[in-house]
Image (cartoon, rainbow, N blue to C red):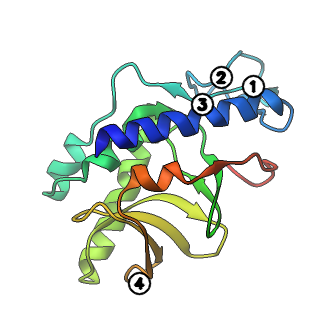
Amino acid sequence: MTQNLNTALDEFVLCYEKLILQSPEETKIEFNSKWPSQCYRQEKKDGDLVAWKPVLREVPGVFTGLEAGLEMTIHPDIIAYYGRYWSDNLNAQAEQGKLQLLQAWNEQDYQRLQQNIVGHVLMKRRLQQAETIFFALTDEDDFFLSVDNASGEVVLEQVGLVPKETLASDLGSFLQKLQPQIIERVGIT
């Protein structure tokens, strides 16, 4: 499954990079020297708009500490998904609507992501619901996309509730159906 995911994610990122090249002004982000990343294509002074692109990580990220802390095995698709690239969040269009694929910008962001996953999993346990790991936001308030940690299925969830709908049998299959999108960056961080 992870190979399918890597291929699907790589193809999506390649298409996204083509969009970045076609719409360079719409895809620039503010340079922040206190929030470094390999994704910046150039260094400028803080606040200047700069080009960026996703960067394949030299060493894939792992969730070893997260797994130990939660005393669980994280689904390999989630580990591969979050550990493959450094990137800003990636906008996409799914059959069901617009979404934003969550990504880690740098190592600090990767650690923050893991802390958010801990909070999510602990909430699911407290509610006695199946453990899921989020990977995307939707354009509907309080709805997000997750991977069911046991089955690997992609599910639509609402905060605090059991998954509402299964969207794909695995994350790689879901990513294959997405179309990259460029949207205005106002309000998106």
Residue 140 vertical position relative to residue 189 in the rendered view, above or below: below
Q: CA distance from mark 4 to mark 2?
A: 38 Å
> Marks 1 and 2: CB-CB under 8 Å?
yes
Residue named by callout 3? 14
Q: Is residue 163 visible?
A: yes
Residue named by callout 4? 161
Secondary structure under the numbered disc 3 in the rendered image: helix
Task: Please tell me whether mark 1 or mark 3 is closer to you in this view.
Answer: 3
Q: CA distance from mark 4 to mark 3?
A: 34 Å
Residue named by callout 1? 51
Q: Which tag, 2 or 3, sits closer to the chain's start?
A: 3
Three-letter amino acid code of the residue under disc 4: Leu
Mark seen at residue 40? 2
Three-letter amino acid code of the residue under disc 3: Leu
Question: Who's the residue at 60% across and 39% down the image?
Answer: 88
- The x and y percentages for residue 153 are 34, 64
